Image (cartoon, rainbow, N blue to C red):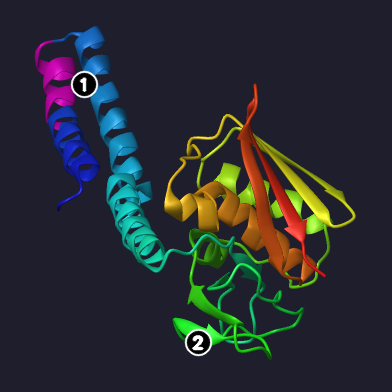
Amino acid sequence: MRNPYQRLGVVLVVVGAALTPVLYFVVGSVPLAALALSTIILGLVSAMLGNARPEITPEASQMMLKTGMENLAALLEELGLRSRAVYLPSSPGNRPRALIPLDEDSSTPRTGQTPPDRLIARYGPNLEDMCLVVTTPGAVSLDSVDIASGGGPDEIDGALNHLVVGIMDLADSISVHVVRDRVTVEVVKPKLKYENIWFYRCLGSPMASIAATVASQAMARPVRIVSEEETKRGTRIEIEVLP
């Protein structure tokens, strides 16, 4: 039994069960017997916490996320890419992907385009329409929530609150405002902050990546993170819905 919560729970239950009859019938102390009984209750609570504990600890998840980000950032820096990633919705059998154009002046991926299943690919008719195809934190996070492709702007707010606030507990609350081709996401008290590093400049922060992926999936159109800025309440993320 490797789970520390379950080990503690078993110890508390065994000790409490052994001491309760002794303290009540032999010693004749009701307060001490009640204390031993409460030990059993604490043990059961600890055991239940052990069952609810995730198999992968938050520390291990953070380590793997940081490792992947640093490796991808090194690749982007080595290639000298400064283009902002274009997030595409999922296609049958594939997760949503992000395309990072190798040329900032190349064309924009079209709506309905299927992300190529390779690292370096051509996404347009022109010779300069080459890109890196990457899986982002936002794409992986969608495994935890069902968003219908093309469900519309109304799905963005609910999906982000369910995913970021309810499941991941990365912020206190999220509000979404959609005006024409702009999606503004207000994140209150985020636990992941924006950093001015190469990875974030191309793909956005993990929080922005999740927001862009959800927006792309709900709108069934390519999107791009325009800006991230700190506010008094938290972070404002501006996302552009591409034609």
In this picture, residue 32 sits left or right of residue 200: left
Residue identified by numbered label 1: 36
If the image is split into quadrants, where does the C terminus sit?
bottom right
Which stretch is magenta?
A: 18-27
Q: Residue at x 65, y 21 (%)?
A: 232
Question: What element does badge 1 sit on?
Answer: helix
The amino acid pointed to by label 2 is Asp
Q: Residue at x 20, y 11 (%)?
A: 32
Q: Which residue in the rendered view is the most extreme toward the right?
A: 180
Question: In the image, is residue 210 above or below residue 78?
Answer: above
Distance, label 2 to label 1, CA atoms, is 60 Å
Label 2 CA crowd tier, 10 Å (few <14, some 14–19, many 20+): few
Which x, y percent locates residue 3?
Answer: 20, 48
Which x, y percent locates residue 86?
Answer: 63, 67
Prevalent SS, magenta region: helix
Which x, y percent locates residue 10?
Answer: 18, 41
Residue situated in front as seen by the camera: 147 or 175: 175
Q: Which mark is residue 117?
A: 2
Q: In the image, which is nearer the foreground, mark 2 or mark 1? A: 2
Residue situated in front as seen by the camera: 24 or 95: 95
In this picture, residue 210 sits left or right of residue 72: right
